[in-house]
Image (spheres, rainbow, N blue to C red):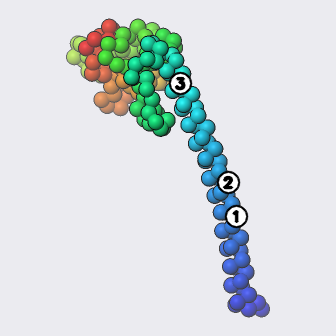
């Protein structure tokens, strides 16, 4: 029969090995985190430089000046037109015309604006599909929901209740005027 002290020493040795293993793993993860963070910061800086080059005014306004910390650029993006019109949904800003959007996005905005003008309230994705002459099937409805959510994220639409969409304040007409 082993002694109590011998059993305690075995348990202590096992615990020490476990602690050493976890410390090595923590060091490895810490190094991997530092590398990933450095890579992320480099990509953020590269994106900021591309934004400056592709700015409509060539990057000469104060609006294109970035923040010191690239993480702040993700928190507060600077609204701009898309680099290539119709290639993506740009952030909405006062005076930005609907013409920067693809036809599908304009149709969604137009339907929402028409309903708001007529006092009919927000529109659902099922109602959008029916209004656009689509089959009201999950695939079509989810595609429209994805587009509507993208418009919400970019400031073109508001979602006052889950799944119900209306133009955001100031985005009431095709010309971008309120």
Tell which of 141 and 116 is nearer to you: 116
- Label 2 residue SS: helix
In the picture, the disc for residue 28 is: 2
- Nearest to the eye among marks 3 and 1: give it: 3
Q: Are marks 3 and 1 in contact (CB under 8 Å)?
A: no
Q: Position of residue 155 (x, y in %)?
A: 36, 24
SS class of the residue under badge 1?
Answer: helix
Q: Quadrant of the N terminus?
A: bottom right
Identified at 69% across, 79% down, the residue is 11
Q: Is residue 58 left or right of residue 160?
A: right
Q: How far is mark 3 from mark 1, CA to CA?
A: 42 Å
- The residue to which callout 3 is attached is 49
In the depicted structure, whether residue 111 falls above or below residue 155: above
Q: Quadrant of the C terminus?
A: top left
Q: Pointer 3: residues within 10 angstroms few (<14), some, or many (20+)? A: some
Residue 177: x, y in percent?
28, 11
Q: Earlier in the sequence, mark 3 or mark 2?
A: 2
Q: Nearer the viewer, mark 1 or mark 2?
A: 2
**Between disc 1 and disc 2, whose residue precedes?**
1
Mark closer to the chain start, 3 or 1: 1
Q: Residue at x 36, y 10 (%)?
A: 97
Q: CA distance from mark 3 to mark 2?
A: 32 Å
């Amino acid at each position: 029969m082993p002694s109590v002290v011998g059993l305690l020493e075995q348990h202590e040795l096992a615990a020490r090995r476990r602690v050493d293993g976890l410390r090595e793993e923590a060091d490895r993860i810490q190094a991997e985190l530092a590398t990933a963070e450095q890579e992320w910061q480099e990509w953020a800086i590269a994106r900021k430089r591309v934004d400056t080059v592709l700015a409509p005014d060539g990057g000469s306004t104060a609006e294109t000046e970035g923040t010191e910390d690239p993480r702040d650029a993700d928190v507060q993006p600077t609204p701009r037109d898309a680099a290539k019109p119709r290639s993506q949904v740009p952030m909405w800003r006062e005076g930005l015309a609907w013409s920067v959007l693809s036809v599908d996005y304009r149709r969604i905005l137009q339907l929402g604006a028409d309903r708001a003008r007529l006092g009919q309230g927000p529109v659902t994705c099922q109602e959008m599909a029916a209004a656009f002459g689509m089959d009201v099937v999950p695939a079509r409805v989810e595609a429209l929901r994805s587009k509507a959510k993208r418009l919400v994220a970019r400031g073109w639409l508001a979602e006052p209740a889950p799944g119900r969409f209306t133009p955001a304040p100031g985005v009431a007409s095709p010309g971008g005027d309120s």
